[in-house]
């Protein structure tokens, strides 16, 4: 069941990314291209969902690496999957937030250092504090995985 999602994810994401880039290049037809992309993604996700729900569980021989670990976690119980999903959300959310924070503080730090080079130490502290957000999310993710 999980193997179908892992195999179909690139099949859905890659064409969506290509069509999105195509829409950005052709501004006049961009809305039409994005509407077609959305429709194709909806159809693909629906087909994938139907195949996943009606298919038989994958055997351990067909899975490898992370797929086997995810399959074992999903089949062992519902409580473990919730902790693992929470860990993924905490790590992803904190990393995205840290990326946004570092983008703004880094740009401001470079602008401040271009005018006054002696502000290097202070500005790097602020950028480091923004990066700490990702570390906190990673710690929460490790704690949640340890509880699973």
Image (cartoon, rainbow, N blue to C red):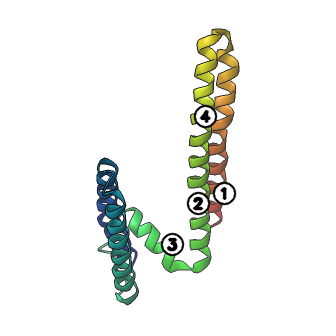
Marks 2 and 1, how far apart at CA: 13 Å
Q: Residues within 10 Å of mark 1 (few under 14, many from 20)?
A: few
> In the image, what residue occupies the spot 32% across and 70% down?
8
In the image, residue 32 above or below residue 61 = above
Q: Residue at x 53, y 78 (%)?
A: 76
Q: Which mark is residue 73?
A: 3
* Residue lying furthest front: 28
Give the residue number, with chain letter if any, for mark 4: 104
Residue 69 location, x and y as percent? 45, 67
Number of the front mark, 3 or 2: 2
Q: Is residue 107 left or right of residue 34?
A: right
Left or right, residue 70 beside residue 30: right
Q: Which residue is mark 1?
A: 143
Disc 2 on helix, strand or loop?
Answer: helix
Query: Which residue is found at the position 38% from the left and 80% from the top?
Result: 46
Q: Nearer the viewer, residue 120 or 141?
A: 120
Measured from the top left, where is residue 110 in percent x and y? 58, 21
Would you place residue 82 above or below residue 33 in this image?
A: below
Cα separation, mark 4 vs mark 3, equals 38 Å
Say which of marks 4 and 2 sits in front: 4
């Amino acid at each position: 069941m999980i193997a179908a999602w892992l195999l179909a994810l690139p099949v859905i994401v890659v064409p969506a990314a290509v069509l999105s880039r195509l829409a950005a290049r052709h501004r006049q037809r961009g809305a039409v291209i994005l509407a077609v992309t959305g429709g194709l993604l909806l159809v693909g996700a629906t087909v994938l969902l139907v195949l996943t729900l009606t298919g038989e569980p994958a055997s351990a021989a067909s899975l490898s690496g992370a797929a086997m670990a995810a399959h074992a976690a999903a089949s062992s119980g519902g409580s473990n999957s919730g902790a693992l999903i929470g860990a993924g959300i905490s790590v992803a959310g904190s990393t995205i937030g840290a990326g946004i924070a570092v983008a703004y503080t880094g740009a401001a730090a470079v602008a401040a250092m271009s005018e006054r080079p002696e502000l290097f130490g202070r500005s790097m502290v602020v950028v480091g504090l923004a990066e700490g957000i990702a570390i906190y999310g990673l710690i929460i993710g490790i704690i949640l995985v340890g509880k699973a």
